[in-house]
Image (tube, rainbow, N blue to C red):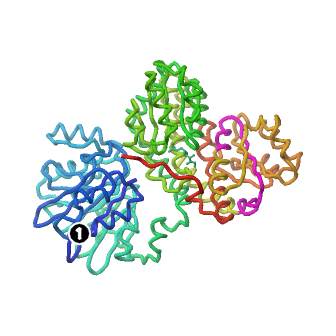
Amino acid sequence: MCGIFGCILKDGDAAPLMHAALKRLEYRGYDSVGEATLNNGQLYLKKDRGKIDEVHKVRNLDDLPGSIGIGHTRWATHGAPLEVNAHPHVDCRGQIAVVHNGIIENYAELELELQNRGHNFKSKTDTEVIPHLIEEAQKNNSSLSLRDAVIEAVKRLQGSYAIAVISAREPDKIICARNESPLVIGINQNAVYFASDIPAFLPLTNKALMVDDGEIVTLSLEGVEIRKIADSRIVPREPKIIDWTPEMAVKQGYPHFMLKEIYEQPECLRNTLRLQEHYVDLMATFLDRAREVYLVACGTSYHACWAASYMFSKLAFLPTYPVIASEFIEQHGKSVNIDSTILAVSQSGETADTLASVNCARQRAATILGLTNAIGSTLTRVSRVYIGQQSGPEIGVAATKTFTSQLSVMSQLALRLAKKRGKVSQDEMDYLAERLKKLPETVETIVQTQEEKAKQIAEKYKDAKTIFFLGRGISTPTAYEGRLKLMEIAYVPAIAFAAGESKHGPISLVEPGFPVVFVCPRDETHKTVIGNIMEMKARGASIIAVIEEGDEEIKNLADDYLEVPSGIPEVLSPIPFVVPLQLVAYYMSVDRGHNPDTPRNLAKSVTVK
Ligand code: F6R
């Protein structure tokens, strides 16, 4: 997730206005910033790594001439946060500049093709292919307009993009295009704007045009023209009046970042399906060679590791040890060695206990692999290989979208390893890959259909003194994650157990009306889970079950239930099954009068540069 903004003004300089607008988009990314403007047929550019204020102090982002410009605030997906990787990116002659939010999946092959045609690349980003593709299109046909050259270029792209392009050859316009990344246009009498999100231009205008996938937009002072990329057909569209306050706009109308981020999960899962094969393969190779593998993390990331240990075992027959990072040194510090591999998982890449475990393991010559949402973080610098999960900044303190994305990445690793080891038949591989691809849609269905039910359940149980969360097998970590979410934002004491353990002690707490949440996929544990439900019911517990659609057996036993679509393979089940639990925790926090975005005593780790 990055933020893009640009404008064409009737009067005045674009740069100071872009600077202010990019500040309003900083919640979409903040590792680098850049702007390009056009003035008297010349392209001017400033960019650097760092937060906007830091870069502005050194470079003065307001000091660029011209009333037309494009800008970008970055959350790195490809290429570390360095000046050279900051946007805008330009073609060989420095005449065409591009800002981009999204992920170009086929950039490596396009880059090779363009290099063979003599193009000179400077960055390690996926974006840089775009200005070169546009340059190439105009080289082959010198009368091609900028708009048509952009059309030719984007037809070669696979992946997601919202792009904006300016060219010194046509200095009165900006061309934008969109596929699966957000893009909105703002208009008033004196200017036209484009942006990733409405808050960028909301103080300037409340008239907005939404751009759809597969559309290309020409912005000029004459107006806005939207066409279909496929056939250049003009699409008529009327502006909408936006009546959001600036605060609502940053949250895109959601009352809290946490709910917005729960809703962003389908998009984030789609991003995880665009990982570079090469890195997944490399990491799987390291895992394959290891004598022992530790999955090390804290909090929610630890729950992802725990669930992943079932995936590695069930799919690739690889035993792995999930370890809470704060315990790693005591537990394994003396035994970890050159044959050990540590897969450290950290959304921020900066969590002290996780980094301490990694340091200890490095000193003992172990191999460090990293999975993080923050490229450029310490974890990426100390890892032999790392994967960026590409979820964009998570502003709500309680992790939601980053958890499901971590699980998606690790399920892909497990699948890749299973393939290397020949442990899963081709038919099963194809089936699992297909189901993995469908997960964004599945999660979309869950948030859309279960929010209301989650609200009702939260309302009904909001005064509970304690709540149990139980699961079996791979659903045990899901139950623990549901419990963590509830505790940290709703401040309800909650206890999680592997359901099989409940009768070895915890069940003594149960009395009539005691709420017990069960995570119940229809996997091999289903029958035993029913047995556990019966035990709880016999003691008068109120059963809240997360079930698959059509699971009449458990539906009939439960006092309340939340449903996920049926037919989810066991190894992928934590991804959809956690979503209703996130929603219940969110609504219980709100019902109890708390702000779920800022739980007391907790803060999010941020990348320190
Ligand atoms: C819970 C939560 C924390 C983090 C933990 C690790 O909602 O957000 O438990 O998961 O602090 O943080 P990272 O993943 O940044 O290492």
* 174, above or below 539, in the image: below
Residue 350 position in % (x across, y down): 45, 42
Ligand 1 within 8 Å of the CB at mark 1: no
Answer whether residue 149 is visible to the viewer in this image.
no
Residue on which disc 1 sits: 14
Around disc 1, counting alpha carbons within 10 Å, would you say few (fewer than 14), some (14 to 19), or many (20 or more)? many
Q: State the residue lying farthest toward the bottom.
A: 189
The residue closer to the viewer here, 351 or 66, is 351
Residue at 66% x, 66% y is 593
Q: Helix or strand or loop: what does disc 1 sit on? A: helix
| Quadrant position of residue 151 | bottom left
Instruction: Specify whether 400 is left or right of 139.
Output: right
Residue 165 position in % (x across, y down): 24, 59
The number of numbered discs placed on residues in the rendered structure image is: 1
* Ligand 1 - quadrant of the structure image: top right
User: Residue 607 lies in magenta, yes or no?
Assistant: no
Instruction: Specify whether 287 is left or right of 168.
Output: right
Residue at 60% x, 35% y is 306
Answer whether residue 570 is visible to the viewer in this image.
yes
User: Residue 473 lies in magenta, yes or no?
Assistant: yes
Residue 184 position in % (x across, y down): 37, 66
The residue closer to the viewer here, 172 or 215, is 172
Which region shows up in magenta?
Answer: 456-480
Instruction: Specify whether 334 is left or right of 68.
Output: right
Amino acid carrying label 1: it is Ala
Residue 495 position in % (x across, y down): 73, 45
Residue at 42% x, 41% y is 388
